[in-house]
Image (tube, grey):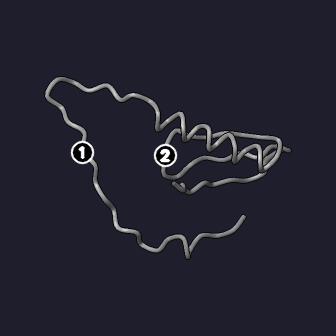
Amino acid sequence: MKYRAIIKKSDGWWIGWLVDLPGVNAQGRTKEELLKSLAIGAQDMLATQVPFEPGSQMAMIEVPDLGLEAKESRV
């Protein structure tokens, strides 16, 4: 899967976060290190067990692709 990341260089560090997975953020000395850390954070987030209260259910929803990849800006 692909996730959108906002990344920038700040004070000698690359910092970023995933738009599609709130709470996944990282930093690295290089852009490549940052992207690898974001990928690991996404894997960890998606592997996390979600506790449920009795009687609750998990539902999956499908959101149509709006062609946003064509509008991505390259950093």
Give SS at disc 1.
loop
- Front position in the image: 58 or 21: 58
Q: Is residue 4 above or below residue 25?
A: below
Please name the residue shown 85% across and 44% down the image.
Answer: 12
Q: Residue furthest toward the left?
A: 55
Q: Look at 82% across and 41% down and name the residue there.
A: 29
- Disc 2 on helix, strand or loop? loop
- The quarter holding residue 15 reads top right
Q: Residue 33: give x, y in percent of width and height.
A: 76, 43
Is residue 33 shown above or below 49? below
Residue 21 lies, in percent from the top left, at: 49, 46
Quick one: label 2, few (<14), some, or many (20+) residues within 10 Å?
A: some
In the image, taking residue 13 as reference, residue 1 lies left or right, namely: left
Please tell me whether mark 1 or mark 2 is closer to you in this view: 1
The dot on residue 59 is 1
Give the left or right position of residue 68, taking residue 75 as reference. left
- Residue 37 occupies which quadrant of the picture? top right
Q: Residue at x 82, y 46 (%)?
A: 30
Q: Amino acid at mark 2?
A: Leu
- Using residue 73 as the reference point, say whether residue 65 is left or right of it: left
Residue at 72% x, 64% y is: 75
> Which mark is drawn over residue 21?
2
For this view, does 59 lie left or right of residue 28?
Answer: left
Residue type pointed to by label 1: Ala
